[in-house]
Image (cartoon, rainbow, N blue to C red):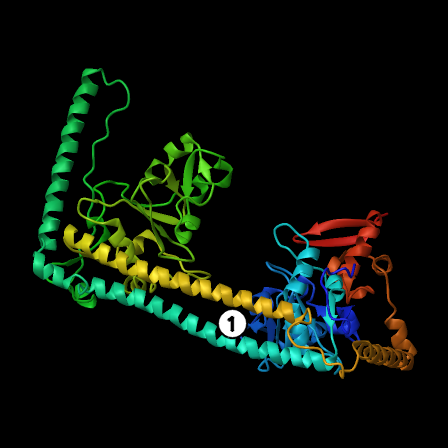
Amino acid sequence: MSQNTGIEIPRSWLQVPLSDLFLDPKNNIVDGPFGSNLKASEYQDEGIPVIRIQNIDRNRFIDKNINYVTEEKSESLSRHSFQSGDIIITKLGEPVGKACLVPEKYEHGIIVADLIRARIDHNHISKKFLLYQLNSSFLIKQFDKYKKGTTRQRIKLSIVRELIFNLPALQEQFRIVDTIEELFSELDTSVAHLELAQNQLKVYRQALLKYAFEGKLTEQWRKQNNPENAEKLLERVKVERQNRHAQELKDWKAAMKTWEEDGKKGKKPGKPRKLKELNEFSGLELEEFPELPLQWKWVKIDKLTEYSSHAIKAGPFGSSLKKEFYVEKGYKIYGQEQVISGNPHFGDYYVDKEKYEELSSCRTKPYDALISLVGTVGKVLILPENAEEGIINPRLVKLSFDRIYYSPFLFKFFFESFFLKSLYSLHTHGATMDVLNLGIIKCLPFPLMSKEEQEKMVNEIESQFSIIDNLEQTIETGLKKSEALRQSILKKAFEGKLVPQDPSDEPTSELLKRIHAEKKKHLEEQKKLKKKAPKKIKQMSKELSIEEVLKTSEKPMLAKDIWQKSKHKENIEDFYKELKDIQSKIKEVKKGTESLLSLAK
């Protein structure tokens, strides 16, 4: 690897590969085990901890969702172990190269395949100096330069071992770390205040919704305006629906007469069905709900939607809307990505007119409410006036409201309130993720009040939420500036501009000489230990190439078993390199997801 890093450092500093800073980089900069050697099925609730990618952030260990393996399994993977205080680096994901220290509470454990463990094996380097530099823009640029892959980017262990580090004297390393931590401490305090304010705004948002749906937000307005009672509103809705059904029957009879007079040609007109109403809440159920103002009433969803058989509709079965039906242009497919992002124009999945007509019951129109059903459940998107014509996918429910009597925007506020979430969350826990469905939604209570009060409430909530949105945006900007300032501090630190150089410090060249001298001594001691090993053990530990391993077996072998018996058992990249070199000599047979290898005859 080239050492042209493109930055200027003090004359007293040196640029060295990471491996030069370790006595035994082969054993102290290692990655996790081959994937098949540590399967998710081997995880358990207690035992020896396993650190995974999701536990690693820049300079921060995320102590959540820790898995465990048995002590026996841990011993079999001892080469891939960690100790408290080790540096753990990600070699997969976006971004690669995030690093943190293992906290003291985890004395030892195992890392997974896509992590790297670095363990300082002498006293001539500051561990925290190394960690902070790993998370600086100087190293981030190197990780970005050497990562490979299209969908899942990764970096090789051999590359990481040769990444270039800026090295000052040991005393200066300590001064740099002290200054970084002093500045970071001040930033941490500011970030904590911003995050506290952020959480308080979330609480205030929910408190406002609670206040609104208890009737307190519009209490004074009701006293001044004496709005229509919900019971009278429901009676008007009932009469309007009866009249509409009667008109549909009249139109059907006229269509039937025309069809018969025309000799019954063409398709027979279908008789309109009277829509079945959902059962009203019982007295016992109503007692469980919060008390409402006298003019309001708890109702089920069918009292709020249009009088239409497709007004309350779940998405089609998955087999009806496979990816093979997607086209570049046509009718939009609305899914979780639009609802969760709050952006109806996001995404570019479409179906043609034929599929759109086939799934006409799932059609959308402006002001429909789309509800996410899986994972991030209960998120609501109200389609705007300029929404594209389209259909919903299987992970959504669509509600078309009778906007003469009910506001879609009031529905969104209530459906995303903590009160309603607390009701449906009792029923949404699946085996692997939360799942909401149409059956649950049909059983939920919704407060109904006059249309005028609905509009007043929506305006009040939107006004308050606009202020909250602006405050949240200010906080988010502050958090981003804080992160940018961290990187600015680290950039200065590792360009030698954060603290002054001290001429009395030991020269960095002398520091490196001492590391190299200690490394030489360490390697000589390792050689002596090997020589003292019994001859029998020495013969047993003979290093075999892949071809030599295959020659010792009469049957085809699993790739992972060949790797473990070969001289490459400590370096998977070298194993694949040799395998590629002798590809013409190898016969491969697939066994499920694994490969059986043998020598070609």
Q: Residue at x 39, y 63 (%)?
A: 472
- The one of 444 and 389 positioned closer to us in this rendering: 389
Q: Secondary structure at mark 1?
A: loop
- Identified at 47% across, 66% down, the residue is 479
Nearest the viewer among 314 and 19 is 19
Q: Residues within 10 Å of mark 1 (few under 14, many from 20)?
A: few
Position in image of residue 103 (x %, y %): 59, 79
Q: Is residue 414 above or below residue 134?
A: above
For the N terminus, the quadrant is bottom right
Q: Quadrant of residue 491?
A: bottom right
Q: Which residue is mark 1?
A: 64
Q: Is residue 73 visible?
A: no
* Most foreground residue, 253 or 518: 518
Picture coordinates of residue 580, whole percent (x, y): 80, 51
Left or right, 93 with respect to 196, comes to right
Q: Please tell me in which quadrant of the rendered image residue 385 appears.
A: top left
Q: Is residue 529 left or right of residue 433?
A: right
Residue 409, given in percent of the width and then of the height, sits at 27, 51
Q: Is residue 198 above or below residue 268?
A: below
Amino acid found under the numbered disc labelled 1: Lys
- Asked if 381 appears above or below 76 in the picture, the reply is above
Tally of numbered tags: 1
Residue drawn where x is 18% and y is 16% of the image: 261
Q: Position of residue 448 (x, y in %)?
A: 17, 55
Q: Is residue 241 visible?
A: yes
Q: Is 92 situated left or right of 298 in this image?
A: right
